[in-house]
């Protein structure tokens, strides 16, 4: 009952003009009622009452984005309130059906600094949904990298291209994993099962060779290995343990039914 709700909220706003709650609820109401211009007026006041207060309306704006013909109006809102873009796109990224709308709403891709959270969410959710080709083409569009099948960035160079088609390195207390001199430096404590470095690839069916140069010390049965498996749940195509310093290589075959693969440096917990 939008008419009655508006009347009650107008009374609340009149009684407490500086109430963020009244402004937020009125802005939410206007978006639900397909009145984005009125919603923008509430956002303006909300931003004056709370720093970046309009960000609180991101979930409501994400719901409004599903209304046919709403995207041009949402782009106008984002032009006036750019701080809304990242929380809005992050909210929309939970549903891969929003992919095309997200790409239309997103501003020009960033070339400096890490990829925004919404890009990682969208790409991860597309892969989780089995939309590998769409995820790969979206990754290429967002990162500006020519999307060619194969292992991306084998020397672990600094790159703004987000995972999963670039390396995702482990973070947290279980290991320290950092790019170093054209390779990867790993300190692994053996206390947790971890993917120390991981990348999704779309290798065509065929035979492949993986080769690395290894240095450092490895306790007996260190449990560190390069693995290749088909997504989403296997089978494992290769397991190449790191047994000591020196060159290390292995072969694996990608079957025709294996559309996407995970190439990972894994660490298995020690006894």
Image (cartoon, rainbow, N blue to C red):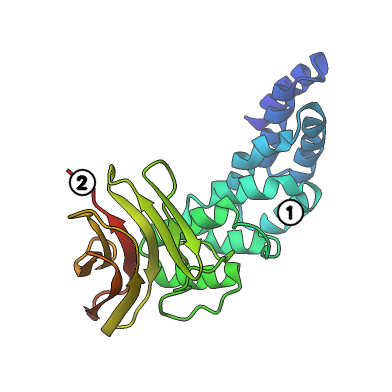
Q: Give me the C-alpha separation between circle 1 and circle 2.
A: 56 Å
Q: Residue at x 30, y 73 (%)?
A: 246
Side of 89 where 136 appears, left or right: left
Image location of residue 82, percent across then percent down: 75, 49
Q: Is residue 102 above or below residue 18?
A: below
Q: Residue at x 47, y 66 (%)?
A: 166
Q: Which mark is residue 270?
A: 2
Label 1 crowd bin: few (<14), some (14–19), many (20+), radius 10 Å:
some
Q: Quick one: SS at disc 1? A: helix
Side of 146 where 229 appears, left or right: left
Side of 176 where 48 appears, left or right: right
Side of 212 where 69 appears, left or right: right
**Quadrant location of the N terminus?**
top right
Image location of residue 52, percent across then percent down: 74, 36
Q: Quick one: SS at disc 2? A: loop
Q: Residue at x 32, y 78 (%)?
A: 211
Q: Which mark is residue 73?
A: 1
**Quadrant location of the C terminus?**
top left
Image location of residue 15, percent across then percent down: 80, 13
Residue in front for this viewpoint, 238 or 134: 238
Image location of residue 48, percent across then percent down: 82, 30
Q: Is residue 66 visible?
A: no
Q: Is residue 13 above or below residue 163?
A: above
Q: Is residue 200 above or below residue 187?
A: below
Quarter occupied by residue 168: bottom left
Residue in front for this viewpoint, 13 or 140: 140
């Amino acid at each position: 009952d939008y008419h009655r709700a508006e009347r009650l909220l107008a009374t609340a706003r009149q009684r407490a003009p500086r109430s963020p709650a009244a402004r937020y609820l009125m802005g939410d109401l206007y978006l639900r009622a397909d009145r984005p211009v009125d919603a923008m007026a509430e956002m303006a006041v909300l931003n004056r009452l709370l720093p970046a207060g309009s960000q609180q309306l991101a979930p409501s704006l994400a719901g409004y984005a599903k209304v046919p013909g709403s995207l041009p109006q949402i782009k106008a809102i984002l032009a006036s309130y750019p701080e809304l873009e990242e929380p809005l796109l992050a909210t929309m990224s939970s549903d891969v059906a929003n992919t095309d709308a997200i790409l239309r709403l997103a501003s020009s891709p960033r070339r400096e600094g890490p990829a925004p959270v919404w890009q990682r969410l969208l790409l991860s959710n597309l892969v989780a949904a089995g939309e590998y080709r769409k995820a790969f083409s979206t990754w290429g569009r967002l990162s500006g990298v020519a999307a060619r099948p194969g292992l991306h960035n084998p020397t672990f160079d600094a790159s703004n291209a987000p995972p999963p088609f670039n390396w995702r390195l482990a973070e947290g207390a279980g290991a320290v994993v950092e790019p170093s001199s054209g390779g990867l430096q790993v300190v692994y404590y053996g206390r947790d099962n971890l993917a120390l470095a991981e990348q999704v690839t779309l290798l065509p069916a065929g035979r492949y060779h993986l080769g690395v140069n290894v240095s450092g010390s490895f306790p007996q049965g260190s449990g560190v290995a390069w693995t290749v498996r088909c997504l989403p749940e296997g089978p494992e195509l290769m397991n190449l343990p790191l047994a000591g310093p020196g060159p290390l290589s292995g072969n694996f075959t990608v079957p025709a039914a294996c559309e996407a693969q995970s190439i990972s440096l894994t660490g298995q917990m020690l006894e």
